[in-house]
Image (cartoon, rainbow, N blue to C red):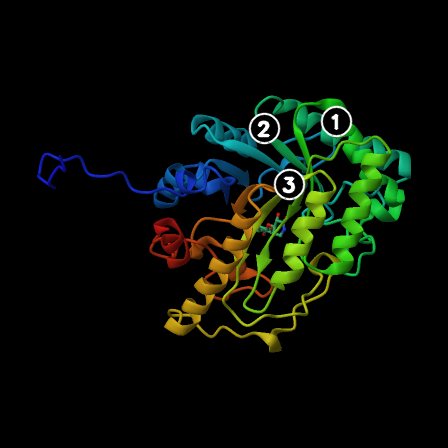
Amino acid sequence: MVSSCGSGQKASREPTLKDYFQDDFLIGAAIPVYHVDGMDPKADSIVVLHYNSVVPENCMKCEKIHPEENVYFWDDADKFVKYGEDNNMDIIGHCLIWHSQLAPWFAVDSLGNDVAPEVLEQRMKDHITTIMTRYKGKIKGWDVVNEAIEDDGTYRQSPFYRILGEEYIPLAFEYAHEVDPDVELYINDYNMAHPAKREAYVKLVNDLKASGHRVDGIGIQGHMGMDYPDMVELEKSIEAFAGTGAKVAITEWDMSALPTIRETANVSAGETLDMSQFQNPYPDGIPREVIEEWNRRMGEYLALFKKHAKEIDRVTFWGTYDGMSWRNDWPIPGRTDYALPFDRSYELKPFLKEAMQN
Ligand code: XIL
């Protein structure tokens, strides 16, 4: 007998992203410290309801967690890990070795000159070992090396590369594996659809494996815009990365709805932004045709990720709702962007609502 919609009937549960994607991949979000501190209750209810994985937006980065030699600041990272545990989420550590947001002391001596290779090796080892040991058994996987390769496939001229050469990457994976043979170890980068970058990562991961190193996953950050990345090239990267035997993850997904700015200043090298490029066309709300196009594009990438759900282990958005996205301030600060799956009223955007109806 078909029951009627009488008042006695229990209201159906709100459909959640984690239910919807349960046969596909983990679904996650990056969260800032104020979120963990309970200062953004609406974002908090979104994360607790919809996500089964979290990554810290900043609090585990070197400049935050290891601001001076032999000085670690654990408070925020501890709270973040507890938050993930309390909510039964798969917790991702981000990130151990990265040129950006690197504590200023890390690669220099007291005069500000590059340290000797063996000093940097020891500092990397201490950093990786101390942090991973503290959270051993609590974290599913670590971004061990972040943003090591340029878009043209060459090594980034980071302090690590300048001082240690290519060897810094196998060393980082070696140190991480020594701490915990059970935690997953990832390498992560942006613009992964660029063919030269794709080839460089495939070679790097294959070489690491051939030399006996463990790399469990390749992270495609997935910072997108209205005219990139090329869908066909992105699919080739997903397939090529999976071909190495590593798990693939979309680790920092967002899509700027604003005009793409190609030239970005290297702020850490002292460059300033070219503000003549400042364009902030939608400070008071995004025109309907633009947000429709944004949703259409996000829906297409989502369909691609679902198509490759066998190879993709996790999809993580870089934030929760538009108002808190780093894209409002990058590559130029002070714009109003619309980059995330929930809007400024904490409403789920159409591309996901529609997907969940199918
Ligand atoms: C960003 C954060 O979202 C910002 O709050 C911070 O000011 C800069 O870094 N690639 C990464 C992330 O791996 O850690 C970056 O996060 C975005 C680009």
Percent position (x, y) of residue 218? 68, 43
Give the labeled residue for mark 1.
177
The residue at 68%/58% (across/down) is: 193
Label 1 Cα neighbours within 10 Å, binned few <14 / some 14-19 / many ≥20 = many
Nearest the eye: 333 or 4: 4
- Position of 78 relative to 153 (above/below): above
Q: Is mark 3 within 8 Å of ligand 1?
A: yes
Give the labeled residue for mark 2.
139
**Which picture quadrant has residue 185?**
top right
SS at mark 3 in the image:
loop
Look at label 2 and name its amino acid.
Answer: Ile
Precedes in sequence: disc 3 or disc 2:
3
Distance between the alpha carbons at the discs numbered 1 and 2: 14 Å
Q: Is residue 148 left or right of residue 281?
A: right
Percent position (x, y) of residue 196? 78, 59
Percent position (x, y) of residue 277? 60, 76
Distance between the alpha carbons at the discs numbered 1 and 3: 19 Å
Give the labeled residue for mark 3.
61
Precedes in sequence: disc 1 or disc 2:
2
**Which picture quadrant has residue 195?**
bottom right
Nearest the eye: 343 or 198: 198
SS at mark 2 in the image:
loop
The residue at 55%/44% (across/down) is: 309
State whether residue 333 appears in this view: yes
Label 3 Cα neighbours within 10 Å, binned few <14 / some 14-19 / many ≥20 = many
Precedes in sequence: disc 1 or disc 3:
3
